[in-house]
Image (cartoon, grey):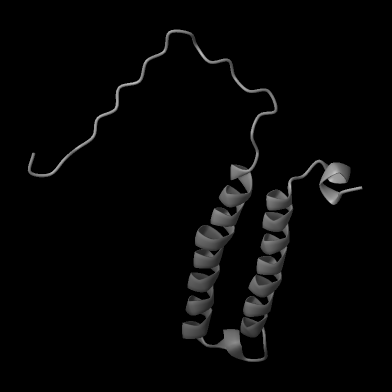
Amino acid sequence: MNLSNLTKISLSELRGIVLVIIGLVAFIFYYSWWFQSGRLMSVWFALGFVGALFYGVAQILCSWIVYLGIHHRPLIQPKRPKNLMVDVFVTACDE
């Protein structure tokens, strides 16, 4: 028995999920530094915390969600239209 067959998740999806979980642990560890005694008492540290939190959520966590969503493909492949032609435009320098 293979783990992929049991869960119906490909190994690349499983690897992505594990990496996001590890990243979340690192994310929590990083933000735990801010909550040690006296760090948020200063206005400048509080503003830095808000900036770091906004950056972390907007840039890091949202991109991880996008990366996990890339693996999800429809199970049924869409039908290809017949008589379909594709033009390819290739640029060339000094031609």
Percent x, y of residue 10? 74, 46
Percent x, y of residue 66? 57, 48
Looking at the image, residue 75 lies above or below residue 94 = above
Looking at the image, residue 43 lies above or below residue 65 = below
Q: Outermost residue, top direction?
A: 83
Q: Is residue 1 left or right of residue 88?
A: right
Looking at the image, residue 37 lies above or below residue 24 = below
Q: Quadrant of the C terminus?
A: top left
Looking at the image, residue 90 lies above or below residue 29 = above
On the image, which quarter does residue 71 sit in? top right
Tell me what residue is drawn at x 85 percent, y 42 percent: 5
Percent x, y of residue 32? 67, 80
Q: Is residue 34 left or right of residue 22?
A: left
Q: Outermost residue, bottom direction?
A: 38
Tell me what residue is drawn at x 58 percent, y 84 percent: 40
On the image, which quarter does residue 61 sit in? bottom right
Q: Of residues 35 and 85, which is closer to you in this image?
A: 85
Tell me what residue is drawn at x 42 percent, y 13 percent: 84
Tally of numbered tags:
0
Q: Outermost residue, left direction?
A: 94
Q: Of residues 52 and 40, which is closer to you in this image?
A: 52
Percent x, y of residue 31? 63, 77
Tell me what residue is drawn at x 59 percent, y 43 percent: 70
Q: Is residue 8 left or right of residue 82?
A: right
